[in-house]
Image: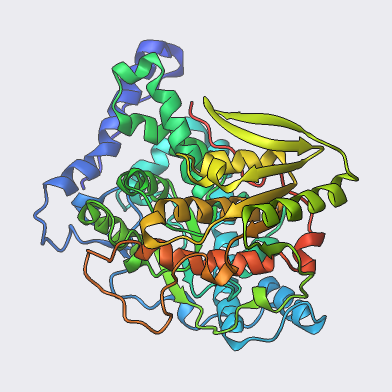
């Protein structure tokens, strides 16, 4: 672009009108490169300017895209750094077993830790430079830049999506990665169910405001993503899964907004990205998000065959198999008396957004529930999170052996265990079958159909393996010694 002479600035004639004219001229010249680029032909060499290893074109201006065929930093990993040191120290102390699959994952997470700290440093430097230069300094530096304005912001490092069988240590490794970062780093760690639940709550609140009559839902999503990014650019999701159409239809817009604003996503899951929301309604509309997820995150499989949740010391007697309701009631009465020193307790209820959850008995953070009250009614993650928030110990009686025809109840039971586990709630169960037989499970060696349509109940069969593993871990000494977490998740609110 040809250089042009800026209008002369006369201090003796300074006034608001002159400032407005000057600002208007500067703004037009700054936006000129973007307008020119948008008029270029799609296959123009100028249009495909390469910057920071990513390809720039008019259809994706303003987004941070990954190199099309560039090698990844994660491929080789790093043998030095705080993540590696933390892992090695835990292995040396006997807290962890040495596992080559975990070690490979730790080396890759070390790369991400280094890249993210550099990313935060670059953002701080850019913010400091902008603050020191003032508005005219930013405008003049933008005019003098040889690259389009969209390239000025700092591209984030690629995120990390790790998946593997239950109990292979995914959550532990993600927490180790977070522990390695300095306290000053802005980071958020949240269970994915709770994250989406809080997002839907924020959208619900927006729909009740007068602005919802004139604003599009895209505007509300942008406001929510702005708040999330303002709090933290590093978002760590445990148990990344998609099980309902409400989440599936929103995730594309939500995460696209997060990535556009520079978010770095780290996630753990039992499933590879291509299996997310498998067999779900209108899954074809969800598939583009899968492609974006794989573009924005390095996908890593932890191919470990050890379920570490089953290796802890077991205390036993927290999962009792009863042959009839009377035996179940006798067992629960004994456990209740042992925990409360024979205090009677009182019936109460929880009110969650107008939904009433009956509590059979409650006493100083200990609660008794029937399976039918929690899992045979239209309840979800928000309701079970309220249980986890209010009670540190839950006694659940009457868990039946469920068939595929009862997959809705099984899904609620899976979500209930997930939330209680996340809140570090102590769980005592009486059931009418051993834990392994409560619901059909998918054979680990069976071939799974790759088509969009999956067999009924497949999602629940797959997820129940995780639930079974968690039930085992929740009976371990390590879990029972852990402190209750009434508020394990950060809140997300709408402006």
Q: Is residue 488 left or right of residue 460?
A: right
x then y, percent, for residue 240: 47, 58
Q: Residue at x 25, y 58 (%)?
A: 287
x then y, percent, for residue 131: 56, 37
Q: Residue furthest right?
A: 341
Q: Which image quadrant for residue 102? A: bottom right
Q: Residue at x 35, y 62 (%)?
A: 457
Q: Nearer the viewer, residue 199 or 153?
A: 199
Q: Is residue 411 left or right of residue 391?
A: left
Is residue 423 in sight in this rendering? Answer: no
x then y, percent, for residue 446: 36, 82
x then y, percent, for residue 415: 52, 52
Q: Is residue 454 left or right of residue 320?
A: left
Is residue 276 in sight in this rendering? Answer: yes
**Marker count (numbered):** 0
Colour mapping: rainbow
Look at the picture and state if 48 lies above or below 105: above
Q: Which image quadrant for residue 440? A: bottom left
Q: Residue at x 59, y 83 (%)?
A: 306
Q: Nearer the viewer, residue 372 or 275?
A: 372
Q: Which image quadrant for residue 48? A: bottom left
Q: Nearer the viewer, residue 240 or 306?
A: 306
Q: Is residue 155 left or right of residue 108?
A: left
């Amino acid at each position: 672009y040809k250089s042009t002479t800026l209008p002369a600035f006369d201090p003796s004639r300074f006034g608001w009108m002159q400032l407005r004219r000057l600002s208007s001229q500067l703004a037009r010249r700054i936006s000129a490169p973007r307008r020119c680029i948008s008029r270029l032909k799609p296959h123009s060499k100028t249009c495909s300017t390469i910057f920071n290893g990513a390809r720039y074109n008019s259809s994706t201006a303003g987004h941070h895209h990954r190199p099309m065929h560039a090698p990844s930093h994660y491929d080789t990993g790093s043998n030095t750094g705080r993540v590696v040191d933390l892992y090695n120290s835990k292995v040396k102390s006997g807290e962890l077993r040495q596992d080559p699959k975990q070690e490979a994952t730790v080396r890759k997470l070390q790369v991400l830790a280094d890249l993210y700290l550099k990313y935060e440093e670059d953002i701080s430097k850019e913010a400091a430079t902008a603050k020191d230069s003032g508005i005219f300094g930013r405008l003049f530096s933008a005019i003098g830049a040889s690259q389009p304005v969209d390239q000025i912001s700092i591209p984030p490092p690629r995120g990390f999506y790790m998946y593997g069988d239950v109990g292979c240590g995914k959550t532990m490794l993600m927490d180790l990665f977070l522990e390695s970062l300095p306290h000053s780093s802005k980071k958020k760690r949240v269970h994915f169910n709770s994250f989406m639940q809080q997002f839907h709550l924020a959208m619900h609140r927006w729909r009740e405001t007068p602005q919802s009559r004139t604003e599009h839902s895209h505007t509300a999503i942008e406001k929510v993503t702005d708040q999330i990014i303002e709090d933290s650019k590093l978002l760590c999701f445990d148990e990344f899964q998609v099980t309902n159409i409400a989440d599936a239809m929103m995730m594309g817009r939500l995460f696209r907004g997060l990535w556009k604003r520079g978010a770095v996503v780290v996630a753990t899951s039992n499933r590879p990205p291509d299996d997310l929301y498998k067999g779900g309604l209108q899954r074809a509309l969800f598939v583009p998000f899968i492609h974006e997820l794989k573009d924005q995150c390095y996908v890593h499989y932890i191919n470990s065959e050890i379920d570490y949740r089953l290796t802890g010391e077991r205390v036993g007697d927290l999962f009792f198999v009863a042959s009839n309701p009377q035996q179940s009631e006798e067992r629960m009465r004994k456990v209740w008396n042992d925990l409360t020193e024979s205090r009677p307790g009182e019936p109460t209820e929880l009110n969650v957004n107008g939904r009433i959850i009956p509590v059979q008995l409650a006493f100083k953070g200990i609660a008794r529930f029937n399976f039918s009250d929690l899992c045979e009614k239209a309840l979800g993650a928000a309701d079970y999170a309220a249980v986890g928030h209010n009670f540190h110990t839950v006694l659940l009686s009457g868990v039946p052996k469920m068939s595929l025809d009862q997959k809705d109840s099984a899904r609620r039971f899976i979500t209930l265990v997930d939330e209680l586990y996340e809140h570090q709630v102590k769980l005592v169960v009486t059931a009418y079958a051993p834990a392994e037989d409560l619901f059909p499970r998918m054979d680990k060696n069976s071939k799974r159909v790759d088509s969009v349509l999956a067999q009924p109940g497949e999602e629940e069969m797959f997820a129940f393996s995780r639930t079974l593993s968690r039930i085992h871990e929740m009976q371990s000494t390590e879990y029972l010694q852990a402190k209750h977490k009434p508020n394990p998740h950060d809140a997300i609110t709408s402006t």
